[in-house]
Image (spheres, grey):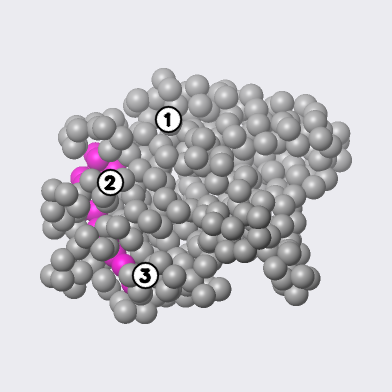
Amino acid sequence: MRGIKPSLALATVGVIGLALAASAVIDRSGSQLATAANRLLSALDDKAKAQAVFEFDSPERLNWHFIPRPRKGLPIKEMTPAQRALAFGLIQTGLGSTGYLKATTIMSLEQILKDIEKGSGPVRDPELYFISIFGTPSDSGKWGYRVEGHHLSLNFVVNNGKIVSATPAFFGANPAEVRTGPRSGLRTLADVEDRALRLLQSLDDAQKKIAVIAETAPKEIRSANEPQPPLDAAEGIAFNQLTEAQRPMLRALIESYAGDMTAEVGQAWLDEVEKAGVDSIKFAWAGSGERTQPHHYKVQGPTFLIEFNNTQNNANHIHSYWRNRLGDFDVPVKK
């Protein structure tokens, strides 16, 4: 993937899923994250720092969710302009360019929801996104970082300067497509929706009988707010059941998710996907094959789970994530 030949003799997989053997680059990514976190912390007063910083082993580290709800951490809303610049620098350091664009666009959709709902829904505020730091950012020892708010939850663990976990990685969008106003036509997560639809539409009838696991899409992704992903067996059509023309389409879909992270982390994800064996990856679809009707898909291999749901608000409300089936949050799955 990303030009990698489909060889399985790739980098050694770390306990919790990142391919650390290729990690001279991963080392720099972890160090850059620590530098960005410390720049923000140095700009905070004691009160703000007390809001932002938790012990690494705090239960709060695993308390993730993507709904609008009260949160712990330091909200961007309460930062000074200088602090906000450093906070967005930290967010950008943990993501690739496409992931950072998605994250900031997701935040901006809160204003659109506020205008649409006119006070009838939950509190909508583009600045209600919270920075939480777990432990002491450093190139030695273990620490973590999260940015979270409505439709965004990004979670990192760094150990001795290496990013050893970057999941769960959740991106959502409401509206999935802005259909009125000056930003009409904006689709924040178009890549992960359209690539899956194109793959589905390329399947012949026999393949669709395998890939389509339900005529009705489930109402939600699974294991929201759970510290570990669902471990059900993979469903759907396997990579080796696709044609030579279809296989690159499934690879491109997987790469869309990995491409949201830094190049180092995204490549590590793809390397471990290859090492575990691409033939065992399965693509499953539920619901309509039309973008404007409720639909849902999963892509699952031994090391990862992608899940996507667009069913709410007349199929104009997306939830999606990449999770590590070996263990999110640097916590190995107990089997």
State the image quarter where residue 208 is shown: bottom left
Location of residue 294 with respect to 75 vertically, above or below:
below
Instruction: Report the front residue among 41 and 103.
Output: 103
Q: Position of residue 164 (x, y in %)?
A: 46, 36
Disc 1 designates what residue?
A: 264
- N-terminal-most mark, 1 or 2: 2
The quarter of the displayed image where residue 222 is located:
bottom left
The quarter of the image holding the N terminus is: top left
Q: Earlier in the sequence, mark 2 or mark 3?
A: 2
Discs 2/3, front = 3
Q: Seen in the image, is 18 located left or right of residue 119?
A: left
Looking at the rendered structure, the kind of residue marked 3 is: Glu
Residue interval drawn in magenta? 271-286
Q: Where does the image place residue 275, in percent across and percent down from the top left?
A: 24, 39
Q: Which residue carries the number 3 mark?
A: 290
Residue type at mark 2: give it.
Arg
